[in-house]
Amino acid sequence: MKLALFGFLAAAMLLPAASFEVASVKPSDEPPTSSNIHADKGLLRAHNVTLMRCIRRAYGIPAVQIAGGPPWLDELRFEIVAKADHNAGDPELMEMLQGLLADRFQLKLHRESQPVSGYALTVAKGGIKAKAADPNVAPNTNSSRGRIEANGCPMSRLIIRLSSALGVPVTDATGLSGSFDIILQWTPDDAPARSGATGEVPQGPSLYTAIQEQLGLKLEARRFPVDMLVIDHVALPSEE
């Protein structure tokens, strides 16, 4: 009986509570050089995004904690524009996005807890260096290879970006609440050395060093349980 109740509650956690008033989902043929998701004041715009990125954003979980699904999750790109019937903020819009993915992509998934090796994000000696966010500025995050820039970024969103950059799960052990304005820049480990007129150009800091020097945070290797999101079914979307 208890096991059945637990299964019911776990499934209920994945059921969206709200939906958009209108929404458009169309394929995109743009190159993958430009891609973003903006959600604020009842409007969600996802430009040139993969379904994997939408799932990550909707459920607040990094790609390394998503299992299953076909290869096109990370290959095909889409344009999504959706509008709520009221001035919904980011958390509510993400619940609506979950519903949109279930409706248009027939996305079905479940959660599993698994122990993994990864990193814990902690506060370094001297405290955090990132500035507290202005509550009057809409949250926005842009990232590229070797750079994360975000306004109104909580630690929960930062660890998703770090998990993607590192390729392993990251857990929040900072104890920090609220949101921050963050600029983090580093040289990826596999970045090719560049040469200039005077020879090889010195590379910038590693991600581990940059986090401590630029944000006042640090990564510690740990083993911990994580929630895995397992895709049971998905299909190419309908546009209407």
Image (spheres, rainbow, N blue to C red):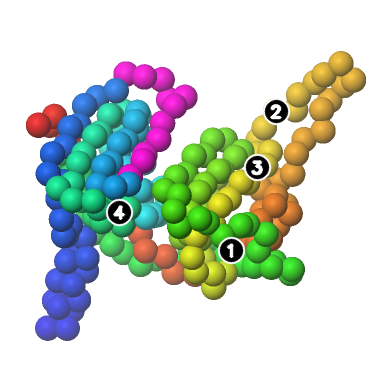
Q: Which residue is mark 3?
A: 185
Determine whether, in the image, residue 77 is placed left or right of residue 175: left
Q: Which residue is mark 1?
A: 121
Q: CA distance from mark 3 to mark 1?
A: 17 Å
Q: CA distance from mark 1 to mark 2?
A: 27 Å
Up-down relation of residue 77 to residue 226 (above or below) = above
Q: Earlier in the sequence, mark 3 or mark 1?
A: 1
Q: Give the mark toward the camera: 4 or 1.
A: 4
Q: What stretch of residues is rendered in magenta?
A: 29-39
Up-down relation of residue 15 to residue 231 (above or below) = below
Q: Give the mark toward the camera: 4 or 2.
A: 4
Question: Which structural element holds mark 1?
Answer: strand
Q: CA distance from mark 3 to mark 2?
A: 16 Å
- Bin the neighbour count of mark 1 within 10 Å (Cα to Cα): few under 14, some 14-19, many 20 and up: many
* Residue displayed at 30% across by 36% down: 45
Determine whether, in the image, residue 47 is placed left or right of residue 199: left
Nearest the eye: 155 or 227: 155
Q: Amino acid at mark 3?
A: Gln
Q: CA distance from mark 4 to mark 3?
A: 28 Å
Q: Which residue is mark 4?
A: 89
Q: Give the mark toward the camera: 4 or 3.
A: 4
Q: Earlier in the sequence, mark 4 or mark 2?
A: 4
